[in-house]
Amino acid sequence: MLLTFDQVSLGGDQSHRLANATGEISDRGITALVGPSGAGKSTLLRLANRLEVPDSGTVQFRGHDINTLDPLVLRRRVAMVFQRPTPFPGSVMENLCVGDPELNETQAVTLLERVGLAADLLARDALLLSGGEAQRVCLARALATNPEVVLMDEPTSSLDPAARTDLEKLARSLANSGIPIVWVTHDLAQMQRIADYVLVMIDGAIAHSANATDLEANSSLPVRDFLAGKKL
């Protein structure tokens, strides 16, 4: 398995609580992490590359407790793209070099092409990009580290429909190329479009996990209510 959560709890604000969350994330395809607002989806994602540390329980990456791994090394292996684009001041080329300081122009162009952007963006001010362009540059910056997985925390929430569709297609392309994606969303229609596997979070716990095609089979009543669009 790619990621394993074993009895993971994290206190604090109610909207960021986890309560004995236990489950696994596959090492292939796109896993959608879904659930009501405040269920702990983003918190679980942040635990996976040590932006948060659990109060109890363990998080494992490829069988290794992440608390035993160097955080900087881990974050290069477990890349993350946030809800809102986070370009740094400077050119697009300078942003990509944050991911790989030894990156040359040819490699940078390849990264841009990989995320569907033109080579002439390299010299552009990253802070002046459109929302969709900025999010793609952030993804290219993450890919510059040659990650083993990309975590995406509601990456399309601030994008227009066209840019959202483009990013979903890009995630599918990356998954098909062998880079697993873990995608947090509260949008059930998006889950249905992109997910190979689904983890449903309810009240800070992983309430159900399944292949996307088998999601409703044997799921609990709260999970069925969530999937039916009922407010929990």
Image (cartoon, rainbow, N blue to C red):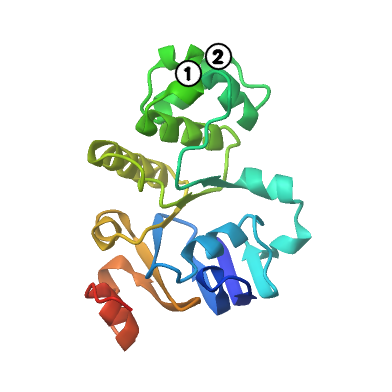
| Residue 219 visible from this viewpoint | no
| Residue at image location 35% in from the left, 48% down from the top | 157
Q: Residues within 10 Å of mark 2 (few under 14, many from 20)?
A: some
- Foreground residue among 128 and 175: 128
The reply, left or right, for residue 71 in relation to residue 154 is: right
| Residue at image location 69% in from the left, 64% down from the top | 53
Dot 1: what SS? Answer: helix
Disc 2 designates what residue? 105
Q: Is residue 43 above or below residue 7?
A: above
| Residue 109 pos. (x, y %) | 47, 18
Q: Residues within 10 Å of mark 1 (few under 14, many from 20)?
A: some
| Residue at image location 58% in from the left, 24% down from the top | 89
The reply, left or right, for residue 227 in relation to residue 108 is: left
| Residue 132 pos. (x, y %) | 36, 33
- Mark 2 vs 1: CB contact within 8 A: yes
Numbered label attached to residue 109: 1
How many numbered marks does the figure carry? 2
| Residue 40 pos. (x, y %) | 50, 69
- Foreground residue among 208 and 85: 85
Q: Is residue 64 above or below residue 224?
A: above
- Foreground residue among 90 and 57: 90
> What's the amino acid at mark 2?
Glu
Dot 2: what SS? Answer: helix
| Residue 104 pos. (x, y %) | 60, 16
> What's the amino acid at mark 1?
Val
The quadrant in which residue 13 appears is bottom right
Q: CA distance from mark 2 to mark 1?
A: 6 Å
Q: Is residue 84 above or below residue 37?
A: above
| Residue 126 visible from this viewpoint | yes
The C terminus - image quarter? bottom left
